[in-house]
Image (tube, rainbow, N blue to C red):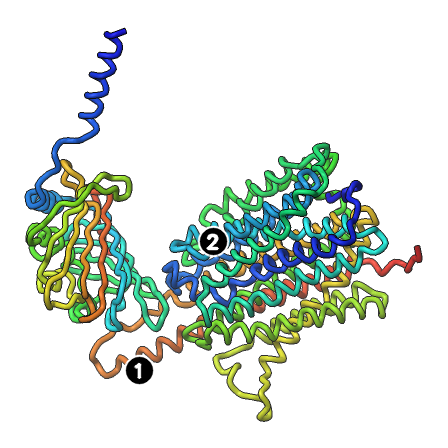
Amino acid sequence: MISPFQSLRPRSANRRIVLALTGAGLFLASLDAYVVVTAILPMLTTVRIPVNHLERATPIITGFLLGYLAAMPIAGGLSDRFGRLRVFIGCLLLFAAGSLLTATAGSLSQLVTGRLLQGAGGGALVPIVLALAADLYPAGGRSPVLGTVSALQEIGSVLGPLWGGLIAASLGWTWIFWINLPFAALLIWAIWPEARVAPEPRPVVRVDWLGAALAAAGLALLTLALYAADPEKSPLGPNFLWQAPLALVFFFLFAWHERRARQPMLDVRQFRDSSFSGGAITNALAGAGLMVALVYIPVLAESPIVFSMNPREAALLLFRLMLGIPIGALLGGFLAGRLRSYRLVAAAGMLIAAVGFVLLSGWSERSLQPHLLGLPLRLADAELLLTGLGLGLEIAPVSAAVLDAVGETQRGAGAAVLIVMRLLGMLVGFSLLAGYGLYQFHQATAHLLPPIPTLLPDFAVRYATYVLHLRQALIAEYHLIFVSTAIALAIGGLIAAVTLRPLPRTRWR
Amino acid sequence: MPGFSAACSVALIVAALAGCDSAPPAAAPLLQQTSERMARLHGFHFRMQITGETGSNEPVQAAAGEVHPPDLRATVDLRQGGFLYEVEVIFSGSAIYLKSITGGWQRLSASQVAQFFDPRSLFDPQLGLFKAMEQTKSPSLGQKESVDGHDTYPVSGAVAAARMHQLLSLIRDHGAYRATYWIESPANTLWRARLSGNLFDATRPAAVTFDFSNHDQPISVTPPPLG
């Protein structure tokens, strides 16, 4: 997918600066990947979405993932064809335009469009910056650089919810997106001289426009098919029956086209390898788990009838889980090497995360109150950290197993598959569980009528009883979502345990 | 080619004449005629949006729905504790139904409705907005404006606060407020109406904007299934 520029002579004076600038752009965009989760309730108020119709907020999250998924696979090829820095600037402009639309959104459609563009621009930066790093550093010494670039992206996405919650609670949520504009402008201004003197684009590289279009059409239809616009009636989209099969047709056409393509965007034949496809599926299920935690922990925390936290408090709560992820990731890499087993560590990570979700599903409205033994620690904090650790543990062994399966020359494509599968898991998993959870909530409250205000003395009692029932139904919805996620993660653990191959012998080259 | 240029000049003059319409209508008769036309409609869609300072006692933020006077069906956005909630209401015959934030439809008693505002007064033939149009004092015609793609004349004037309180009981009944109506002429179609002033709070301004569409579309409002 990504072929390095042979002609690019590394100018050692500039390459660090170029990589630092593009890395900063990548960091800026990755901060915004999950930034909305803690700010979503204030955002809903701005675009006038009532909290008893949360399903209308789903596209704010799925729109971003869709943009990211549609743009990311083709970005590497585009940068091969037109030049890394030029495409980088174009994508940063797209990201900034998306930020502007989001910040000024007065309607849901503008907000979703803004997030879609942010996702497309931000997602495209990942393969471009990775490919640029590979161009700038020789084959022997590029691994730490690629690691740093990937880490920037991961750290940005871990910090995003905290960043979003802090800004939403202090300056107001629109500043999350306004801040991007001066930074993007500054980066473009700084990179511009480099982009002008960069090597000539290579017109010989063919961009797989058809593949990208087929994949984007399939993804868009899938997103629509799974979008439960009326969860009172159905946990799926109103047009699921024709949209889902049509999405499958597009995916089939995409796979068929990619098999025939001379320079495929995605090598679908690799999925025949069980270690590859098992790793990819595990990665998707882990992505779904992460997305559920990212969305539902803050929404539950900020819910006016459960914990009533502000965005800052909700962000700090979620941060306990997010903190576990990088710790788990480092530990997972170390353990996989030490135990010489991908499957053991990956399966353990998925199962620990599944146990974490089961524990989280047991939360009640009192879960965040008592402090253990007078310490400023709660059982809930430990449960969050454990879940994050589990989600982190699987990253290194699953990624390594997938990359081992593709061979030396296909590493870039393998890494892209990992990102695509993770996001696909996020998109599908979140859409399904959001629709299913809301559907169950409506079923549970179908006969729960709120009392009408009267001057009769029993109104207060009836109202309190109503709120109690409502809270129970809401907690039951979260219980269901978290337990379903736990089951999905456990299945992922099983798949990893069965499919992942052991580590290859270390070869010194 | 004198013939050609003459033809061109004539064409230009005709085009220029066609470009500047017939003389703008007079404000008062325009309000009068539009008021009568709107009151005669068999059905229309409306969107109501409240902006500015609405005070703590006023939970309604917006409403939208279809009307076949005096029946109507609408969704209403309410703000409580910093959050927005959506409920649905149906006024059919003498019965009033509510679908609140959870559960199905329930029928309300008159005393229960009295706790909220009764939106039927908005489009009541004697008390409602369309009747208030022709009672607007010293109306003046503004420059043509486009509202949702329709060429309209804005007509502004003063309305007594007590009169506005009649059509929307949430509005304070002291002093006078400003009303603007965006009217397409000569069809006498009202596309937008706005009431502004310190509507809900004695010191802070607010506005209520109504947008109308689907004029005279036949609309029937039937009682919902209960439960």
Quarter of the image with the C terminus of chain B is bottom left
**Residue A51 occupies which quadrant of the picture?**
bottom left
Per the image, the residue denoted by label 2 is A100
Instruction: Identify the secondary structure beneath mark 1.
Output: helix
Residues tagged 1 and 2 counted as in contact (Cβ below 8 A) = no
Q: Where is residue A288? Give x, y as percent.
A: 61, 60
Per the image, the residue denoted by label 1 is A461
Instruction: Identify the secondary structure beneath mark 2.
Output: helix
Q: Nearer the viewer, residue A175 or A378?
A: A175
In the picture provided, is A263 more to the left or to the right than B80? right
Q: Amino acid at mark 1?
A: Val
Mark 2 neighbour density, 10 Å: few (under 14) some (14–19) many (20 or more): many
Q: Is residue B226 visible?
A: no
Q: Chain of mark 1?
A: A
Q: Nearer the viewer, residue B112 or B14?
A: B14
In the displayed structure, B9 sits above or below A78; it is above
Q: Amino acid at mark 2?
A: Leu
Q: Residue at x 20, y 41 (%)?
A: B144
For discs 1 and 2, the disc positioned in front in the rendered view? 2
Q: Where is residue B88? Give x, y as percent.
A: 29, 60
Q: Where is residue A58? Give x, y as percent.
A: 48, 57
Q: Residue at x 24, y 39 (%)?
A: B150
Quarter of the image with the N terminus of chain B is top left
The disc at residue A448 is: none
